[in-house]
Image (cartoon, rainbow, N blue to C red):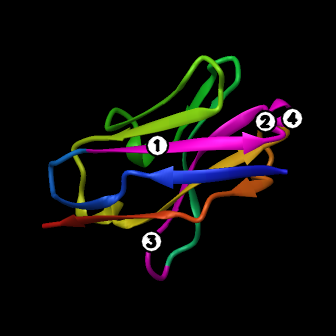
Amino acid sequence: QVQLVESGGGVVQAGGSLRLSCTASGSIVSVTTMGWYRQAPGKQTELVATITRGGTIRNADSVQDRFTISKNRAYDTVYLQLGSLKPEDTAVYYCTAAIRWGDWPNYWGQGTQVTVSS
């Protein structure tokens, strides 16, 4: 089992920035991919960005050049730097972990709310 705990959400004005953090614990050695998904009100959960243990990054087109995912050396913490925020970025952001690259995440954090005001 892997436990994920997010922090860093909040309310920000459009054009602003936030940094989300996620700390993983448990059987981290089994994880190949950590990342972030989000769910906006009334919408499906969607991928935001993922990063592998080796540093390969995948970004959603909607956040390309605005959001940056990174990790620490131990691969037990991942970060999501959100920039140039738009009201449509308002969502609950979930930290995730997957055992296999490309698979739907096996583990999810409790989520952290990001609200962007116009």
Residue 43 lies, with reference to residue 55, above or below; the image says below
Q: Which residue is mark 1?
A: 21
The label number, if any, that marks residue 28 in the structure image? 2
Q: Amino acid at mark 3?
A: Ala
In terms of secondary structure, where does tag 1 sit? Answer: strand
For the record, the magenta segment spans: 18-42
Quadrant of the frame with the C terminus: bottom left
Task: Specify the amino acid type for callout 2.
Answer: Ile
79 with respect to 74 (left or right): left
**Which one is earlier in the sequence, the residue at label 1 or at label 3?**
1
Q: CA distance from mark 4 to mark 2?
A: 5 Å
**Circle 4 is placed at which residue position?**
30
Mark found first going from the N terminus, 4 or 3: 4
Indicate whether residue 66 is drawn in magenta. no
Asked if residue 60 can be seen in this view, the reply is no
Q: Give the vertical position of 21 relative to 93 (above or below).
A: above
